[in-house]
Amino acid sequence: MPSPKKSSIRWADRPKLPGAAAIRFAAAALAFAVPTACVAVPSAGDQPAAVEQIAPPSLRYPGLFQRVALSGVVDPKDWVDAEPRAPDAEILAAFAEDAPDTDEALAEFVGRWFDLPEPAGSVDLPDDLTLTEHIDALWPHLTRSADPGTARGSLLPLPHPYIVPGGRFREVYYWDAYFTLLGLGPEHDDIKQDMVDNFASLIRETGHIPNANRSYYLSRSQPPFFFMMISLLSPDDPAAAWARYLPELRAEHAYWTTGPHRVVLSDDIVLSRYWGGRTVPRDESYIQDHTTADEADRPDADLYRDLRAGAESGWDFSSRWLEDPDDLSTIRTTRIVPVDLNALLYGLEHAIAEGCLRAADAACAMDYGQRASERRSDMLEALPGRSDLLMDFDLDTGKTTARVSAASLYPLFFGVATEEQAAIAADMVDDELLAPGGLLTTPLTTGQQWDAPNGWAPLQWIAIEGLRRYGYDDLAHDIAQRWLATVARSYCETGKLVEKYDMLEHRPGGGGEYPTQDGFGWTNGVTIALIEAYPDLSFYGETHPAEDPESCVAIK
């Protein structure tokens, strides 16, 4: 079918990442005008050693942790977030002495020696608020104070206040945070700065940003949106903000481009992948991973690493990573070179180059400008798949996968794609991912939460902004309208905002390892950002919860 209608005028308000040629030219000019190294920035090879990492609960309580996790007497997330009432050695000695041999005795032991977190429940807000008023009233409930650093449990203390997603997610999650911050206006500048500084402190202390601020998340990260968060501190001049965080940005770049994250496809092509730093079940999903391993016909260590890498991707889990889309035990995340991750790293390299230019470090600007140029060239050579669409690459087959997904919109968001590839991506969206309720994650229905029929706030934003960047304004508007209608209709029916939605039925989504959570940080942020981007759709923000949910079907 023909490409969706393309506007004749590009969206002019979006800050553009400069081309590599412009960076090299400016860097060369600076080299003659000012001294370099005005900002101290560590190179990839001389990163400070990461601080001694706090052991996760599975290592702190050997035997006890596994027994409780596999018994099911405590919710898996509550168990890893529990606060011990005594030193670890005392608890382990008591466990050895008591030797609880029934689930009842085990539950009693846990209740005696640990404080479990309060059950995740709905936030109690007035039921007559509009959608936008509800979101505004949620922010204080989702905000946590700076941590005192005295907790004995798995929480990694942070020096400044932060916003959590909500529900069972009691800590700040890495990539969630960027999309959450999109919905915060100038009146929230302090918490934006606090969030950025918290993540910067994690990079300095651990060498990367963990999945979230818990000890059991230290062995992995999440999609690297830190530089995009920093840009929100100075939206009219992001380079000024990037210049203030160059050491942290360069340390994060090193995390993603060295060691096992670095993948050499050929003598000329080097890209990055997701990775899992341990080869055991995830603490927070111990029983689920153990069950998956029981069903797998492969070494447990390989399976656990691929499950952890899938969690690092944020898409936990999706047919993107599965050899058999209907069998999680066939997950092979570490054998996939992801199109979204490499588009993000292209953006990160440009951000560092711009920050270095602002800091008058010409050598750095030239270096990272060249890295960005090379990454784009490598992506354009290795990642074109069906009809030249930029897609994930399979290390085992030596070619791109056949899995269509919203990840192919990242090259549009960051300006990697050519005009022709953008047109192909727009066609793909219109033909395979556009659903009544917004953008599908993939066209496959597998029972995994990052597949159909689910749609997620961050992917709506990436797709909409990416399509607008290349002039596909009508298609972008269509996705925004459908998504906002889904969020508004669900709010009308339930009085809640949730983490994911069913794009076919205009209702909360399902699938995955846990019940759909409400709150919800990134849904709140993207919803407000889209209402601000599209004033003609602001009426969705006036939606109220209905006494008769049947009346909500009128929301289109």
Image (spheres, helix red, strand yellow):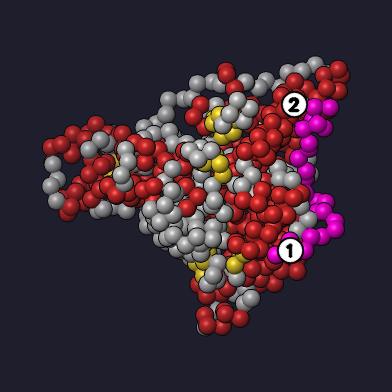
Image mark count? 2
- Residue type at mark 1? Pro
Q: Is mark 1 on a helix, strand or loop?
A: loop
> What segment carries the magenta color?
1-25
Count neighbours of disc 1 (C-alpha within 10 A) and say few if under 14, some if 14 to 19, many if 20 or more.
Answer: few
Q: Please say whether residue 342 is visible from this viewpoint.
A: yes
Q: Please say whether residue 204 is visible from this viewpoint.
A: no
Q: In which quarter of the image is the N terminus?
A: bottom right
Q: Which of 245 and 254 is in front in this view?
A: 254
- Residue type at mark 2? Ala
Q: Write down the residue under mark 2.
A: 365
Q: Write down the residue under mark 1.
A: 2
Residue at screen point 58% across, 41% down: 341
| Residue 369: image location, x then y, percent | 73, 29
Residue at screen point 60% across, 70% down: 436
**For residue 550, side relative to residue 526 (left or right):** left
